[in-house]
């Protein structure tokens, strides 16, 4: 990462997510802490594109309405695929990768190492990864943005479903250290059915809405600015491991195998964005980052090796997979916008899967959210 880790006052010590309020009319957003002054950053082509696509609200007396944005320059790989399947035609600057993958993979001629696989995941697979992202992936020892404040938080999704509350209990620490220094108080957080006398509490449903990231496999440690193998962790789940290997294949150097060692799960709510950044903490950039989109449609910006390059904007829909390897790994990228309105979110396939009473919490979540799972080989 080229930027500093996010710092206080907000919880997530993740490599790239920090909520900031940009200006009065802008929605809260997730941004990289910029390594240039705000005046300078306004001037870069990347920042300009972010401003063009991010959500602004016009406030009417009754509700906030997202201001219209010109989407005519956003590359749409879904329609490119439809045309290609129909008559083999491609638009200028886009080519198809010749390989034995079971569906077309598109490349941008100006960005070697970037691959786009529209609709790579079936609706069933998408549902499965959404369920996993909400239930199992945020479970300890995997860390989330909530760790910094609450310590490990167990069963967040179920607790939200059951209307539970996270409360703190003040505990007196009586270890050797505190005996020397006088007893020290600390807080321990746990989910309960109802609010008792506890002085501090937060609804599980609020915490679920504020879930920004979870990390799988080898954990990234901001304080050391590197992956930290000594932090407790589980291996990437087998099914995700297999999927990432299969997806990575078309972007792998000849004869080599992708080793999925870490993954970051990003959770976007309405108005959230991911600022332009590079992922440069992994050792071997010839290996791809495998990035899967779930839930509401988004705009992805793929820039060049500096923020001065004008980025290409493209839609990311639920089920799309993007690979970034080689030169494309040196390119700034980000997500300035997710679409949570019924017309633009394009989640009707998901909605028709999450129909049962017990699936309602997933349906509610997905209607206003996007999840991105990106899988990396670290060493
Ligand atoms: O959300 C996305 O599609 C991109 C995520 C990303 O670039 C990252 O986590 O490094
Ligand atoms: Fe990234």
Image (tube, rainbow, N blue to C red):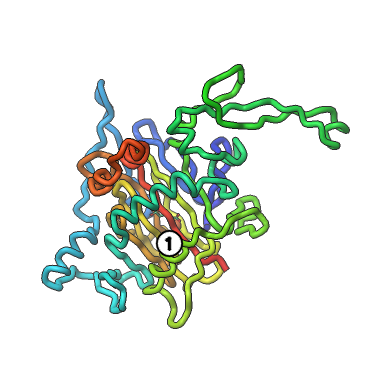
Which residue occupies 49% across, 33% down?
Answer: 159
Is residue 38 shown to the viewer in this render?
Answer: no
In this orientation, which residue lies closer to the viewer: 132 or 173?
A: 132
Q: How many marks?
A: 1
Numbered disc 1: secondary structure: loop
Q: Is mark 1 within 8 Å of ligand 2?
A: no
Q: Position of residue 371 (x, y in %)?
A: 39, 48
Q: Position of residue 363 (x, y in %)?
A: 32, 40
Apparent side of residue 91 relative to residue 48 in the rendered image (left or right): left
Ligand 1 in which quarter: bottom left
Q: Position of residue 120 (x, y in %)?
A: 30, 62
Choose top left, top right, bottom left or bottom right for residue 301.
Answer: bottom left
Where's the C terminus, which quadrant? Answer: bottom right
Is residue 114 shown to the viewer in this render?
Answer: yes
Which residue occupies 45% across, 33% down?
Answer: 160
Which residue occupies 39% across, 52% down?
Answer: 129
Q: Which residue is mark 1?
A: 306
Structural crowding at the residue carrying mark 1, measured as other residues with C-alpha within 10 Å and reported as few (<14), some (14–19) or many (≥20): some
Does 298 appear above or below 289? Answer: above
In this orientation, which residue lies closer to the viewer: 247 or 33?
A: 247
* Residue located farthest toward the bottom when viewing the structure as drawn: 255
In this orientation, which residue lies closer to the viewer: 226 or 7?
A: 226
* Residue located farthest toward the right when viewing the structure as drawn: 180
Q: Position of residue 237 (x, y in %)?
A: 50, 58
* Residue located farthest toward the top when viewing the structure as drawn: 197
Does 24 appear above or below 48? Answer: above
């Amino acid at each position: 990462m080229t930027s500093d880790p996010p710092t206080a006052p907000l919880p997530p010590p993740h490599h790239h997510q920090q909520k900031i309020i940009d200006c009065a009319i802008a929605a809260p957003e997730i941004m990289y802490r910029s390594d240039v002054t705000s005046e300078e950053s306004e001037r870069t082509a990347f920042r300009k594109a972010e401003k063009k696509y991010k959500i602004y609200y016009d406030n009417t007396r009754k509700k906030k309405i997202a201001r219209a944005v010109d989407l005519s320059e956003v590359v749409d790989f879904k329609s490119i695929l439809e045309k290609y399947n129909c008559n083999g035609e491609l638009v200028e600057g886009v080519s198809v990768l010749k390989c034995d993958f079971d569906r077309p993979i598109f490349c941008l001629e100006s960005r070697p190492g970037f691959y786009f696989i529209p609709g790579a995941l079936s609706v069933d697979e998408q549902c499965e990864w959404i369920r996993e992202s909400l239930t199992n992936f945020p479970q300890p020892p995997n860390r989330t943005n909530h760790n910094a404040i609450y310590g490990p938080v167990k069963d967040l999704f179920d607790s939200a479903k059951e209307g539970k509350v996270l409360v703190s209990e003040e505990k007196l620490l009586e270890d050797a250290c505190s005996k020397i220094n006088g007893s020290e108080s600390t807080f321990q957080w746990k989910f309960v059915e109802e609010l008792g006398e506890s002085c501090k509490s937060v609804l599980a449903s609020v915490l679920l809405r504020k879930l920004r990231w979870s990390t799988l496999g080898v954990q990234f440690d901001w304080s050391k600015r590197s992956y930290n193998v000594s932090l407790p962790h589980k291996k990437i789940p087998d099914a995700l491991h297999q999927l990432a290997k299969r997806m990575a294949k078309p972007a792998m150097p000849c004869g080599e195998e992708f080793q999925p060692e870490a993954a970051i799960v990003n959770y976007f709510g309405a108005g959230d964005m991911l600022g332009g950044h590079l992922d440069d903490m992994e050792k071997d950039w010839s290996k791809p980052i495998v990035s899967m989109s779930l839930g509401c449609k988004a705009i992805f910006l793929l820039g060049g090796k500096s923020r001065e390059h004008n980025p290409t904007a493209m839609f990311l829909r639920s089920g799309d997979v993007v690979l970034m390897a080689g030169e494309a790994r040196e390119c700034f990228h980000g997500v300035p916008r997710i679409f949570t309105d019924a017309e633009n979110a394009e989640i009707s396939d998901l909605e028709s899967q999450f129909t049962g009473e017990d699936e309602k919490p997933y349906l509610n979540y997905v209607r206003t959210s996007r999840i991105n799972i990106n899988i990396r080989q670290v060493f």
